[in-house]
Amino acid sequence: MNVDVESLGTFNRTAQVGARRAAENLTGMTGIETAVDVTEVTLASADDLARGDRRVGVAIDFEGGIDGTSLLTFSPEGVEVLLDTLLPGEGVEESAVAEIGNIVTSGFVEGWADHLDAIIDISPPAYVEGTGEEVLDAAGFERDRAFVFRSQVGAVGKELDVEFHMFPERDSMEEMLSGGDDPVSVEKLATLREMAEAGAATASETVSAMTGIGTDVDITHLSFVPIEDVPAELADRPYVGVVLRTEGALGGYVLVLFDEASAREVAAALVPGTDEVTTFNEQAQSAMKEIGNVMTSSFIDGWANVLDATIDISPPQFVHDAGPAVAESVVARLGRTQSFAFLFDATLRADDREFDCGIYALPDETDLRTALEDIDPDATAERKTKAGTL
């Protein structure tokens, strides 16, 4: 399946409009001030979406100008906030959640209907609850769907935690996104995503080897977002880490960011004779640069192997700032030449302690297109199979 990047960008904007309408409907119904935090198109597998935490919401099928399924979910705490607002003292009621879901989803679908100049019919809402995997199964999520539209809605002064997923049927997506002068192969993008996942696993092993902190890759995503929305992909809390420029076969930027507590633990493990790091002095900064540099090399080596080319990395730049502020410096540079970004991101966590590290790769769009032309997904799959038998 090939997709036109311009069309993908157009439909991302359409999803943004739909998400804003959905948020407006939620505000109008509850009186709670809401806003869309982020809208993205994600090349996702079922494992990526099957979060372990519990969710409550509704699944609604739609057909017309676009066919598929939508899934609107809240955290259990978010549902309590909504029901306390609408039905104070009456507890959780499936019918109330279904009604909220129906009205909110209608707003999202209206945005698509207006853009497509078509009538889109929606089914009655089906109440769903459970873990991420259980909710996906209840929604009838088809595992071979290529792209998922995802929006997060936040509330002012409230713990609402609203997520909206739109799963278009593959035929509908192909019809909407095919054509264009310079299409991108979804299969080749998936190959790069798999290499990013493998690179994240190697980077995780690097952290463990250098610090003695056992970590695993928790999440790996490939998202397509407007360049100005990239900062919203990072939580608005302090991070410590590095930013590196990549050059060669795949130019762009890589960010390796630890939460402050994890960064102190990492720096203490790397600075000789140090049991605790309270400030990021020159020694601690040097330690963060060292581990960030090695992790980045581990992360992109797989891509270099697939492309059979060299990817060079610049000396690491130490950063200690809120996530959006760190990303804005990168976005300002990439935004001079592109309107959208393919964002590869992975999260590393430890099983036995609070530990959080994110790796974010933002390739230059022109370099990415060139790189995709040289990728043979079949050859890559064969190489992975052979490697697994050694």
Image (cartoon, rainbow, N blue to C red):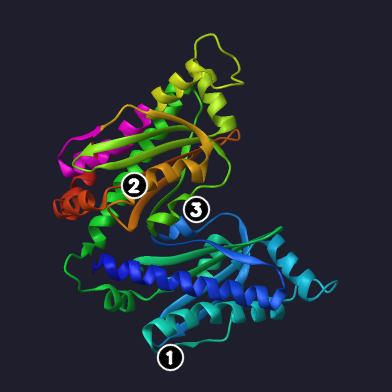
Q: Residue at x 47, y 22 (%)?
A: 285
Prevalent SS, magenta region: helix
- Classify 89 as above or below 305: below
How many numbered marks have been drawn onto this rendered protein structure? 3
Q: Name the side, left or right, on which 154 lies relative to 68.
A: right
Which residue carries the number 3 mark?
232
Span of residues in magenta = 293-312
Q: Amino acid at mark 1?
A: Ile
Q: In the figure, is residue 79 to the left or right of 188?
A: right
Answer few, some or many: residues within 10 Å of disc 3's Cα (few below 14, many 20 plus, some between 14 and 19).
some
Q: Is residue 55 above or below residue 269?
A: below
What residue is at 45 percent from the left and 25 percent from the top? Answer: 288
The residue closer to the viewer here, 14 or 120, is: 14
Q: Position of residue 284 (x, y in %)?
A: 50, 19
What amino acid is labelled 2 in the image? Answer: Leu
Question: Based on the displayed image, in which of its 4 quarters is residue 307 positioned?
Answer: top left
The residue where tag 2 is placed is 362
The residue labelled by disc 1 is 119
Determine whether the residue tagged by mark 2 lies in a helix, strand or loop.
strand
Counting residues from the start of the chain, the first of labels 3 and 1 encountered is 1
3 displayed left or right of 272: left
Q: Name the secondary structure under disc 3.
A: helix
